[in-house]
Amino acid sequence: MRAVRITRHGGPDVLTEAEVTVPALAAGEVLVKVGAVALNNTDLWTREGAYGRPGDPQARSGWRGPIEFPRIQGADVAGRVVSVGSGVDASLVGRRVVVDPAIYDADGPDANPVGLMGSERDGGYAEYVTAPARQVHDMTESPLVDDQLAALPTAYGTALGMIERGRLRAGETVLVSGASGGVGLALVQIARARGARVLAISSGKKIDAVRGAGAHDVVDRAQDVVEQVRAIAPEGIDVGLDVVAGDLVDAGLPLLRDGGRWVIAGALGGYQVAFDVRRLYLHNAQLIGSAMHSPAHFELLMDLARQGEIAPVIAATFPLHQAAAAQEELARRQHVGKIVLVP
């Protein structure tokens, strides 16, 4: 089969197409013919080795540690099951599916992700990929097309994990940073569906697209964000859903109402953060880290997709052999929505 792999950390030039053997099925696994695979910032940072390690933030590392090379990238896969390993229900063959890309630390609905397909195991930049059958979700009845289904796992899974861990409720006011990206748009859509009042941070020509995705108000990140938010929501916000971090944490925490929650799932603005801790303990606020989703979150996401209650925005589609160009397009951050590879 054709696959795009990395053999070392580096720039887009380390992505190379190769003919490789179709992966062998182990017990409890299924083989999926990839219909579409969506790109994420995790692809860029894994390729670059930009995640660091505990005690050594500058270390070259995949999502959760050293990578075994060569590695086929790609966490977000939609496709069809073409064969199953021993112990797997054969009725899955032919079903249209989405793969939960997380590698969990335990069985059970509340397990934590400790690895990721495309980093800690081979992913979907290929014609075929294997996955544990328990992490393959039948989406045959979903009205979403493969491109949209592939956009769900990491971006929408991360977004739903943030919303669940932040305990967002109907009627609350939420602030979404990085709102034009894959996770940001997912946050806007899901928070709006939850009945929240959605304030979003974006800029330039992307503002209209973010508003079209469901944001009630959009503030321009090129101007004073705090001043704009205070003008729109003088009573404060209940939940911050933040994929930017950096200076926004210190600026944003004073916007929280008493008992508010600030949830972080990214560091586009920088991973070293300083803030006034009094804004936490004097106001019973909470600062929450959120890495992807749990199995329970992912099942809830799949239910939303089966019912057509979310509709991912696809910014661009590339053929598999143009994976490097697709990643460069992603890194430019000029798009709104998700970029997808189609084998």
Image (cartoon, rainbow, N blue to C red):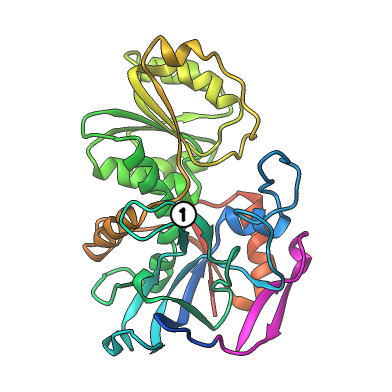
Q: Position of residue 329 (x, y in %)?
A: 64, 58
Query: Which of the 4 image quadrants contains residue 271?
Result: top right
Nearer-the-camera pick, 343 or 258: 258
Relative horizontal placement of residue 343, taking residue 90 as reference (left or right): right
Query: Which of the 4 image quadrants contains residue 224?
Result: top right
Mark 1 residue crowding within 10 angstroms, few (<14) / some (14–19) / many (20+): some
Task: Tell me which segment is drawn in magenta.
Answer: 1-23
Relative horizontal placement of residue 271, taking residue 162 as reference (left or right): right
Q: Amino acid under label 1?
A: Pro
Image quadrant containing the N terminus:
bottom right
Query: Which of the 4 image quadrants contains residue 122?
Result: bottom right
Q: Is residue 157 magenta?
A: no
The residue drawn where x is 43% and y is 69% is: 147
Relative horizontal placement of residue 100, taking residue 123 as reference (left or right): left
The residue drawn where x is 26% and y is 88% is: 91
* In the rendered image, the vertical position of residue 94 relative to residue 248, given as above or below: below
The residue under label 1 is: 113
Nearer-the-camera pick, 230 or 242: 242
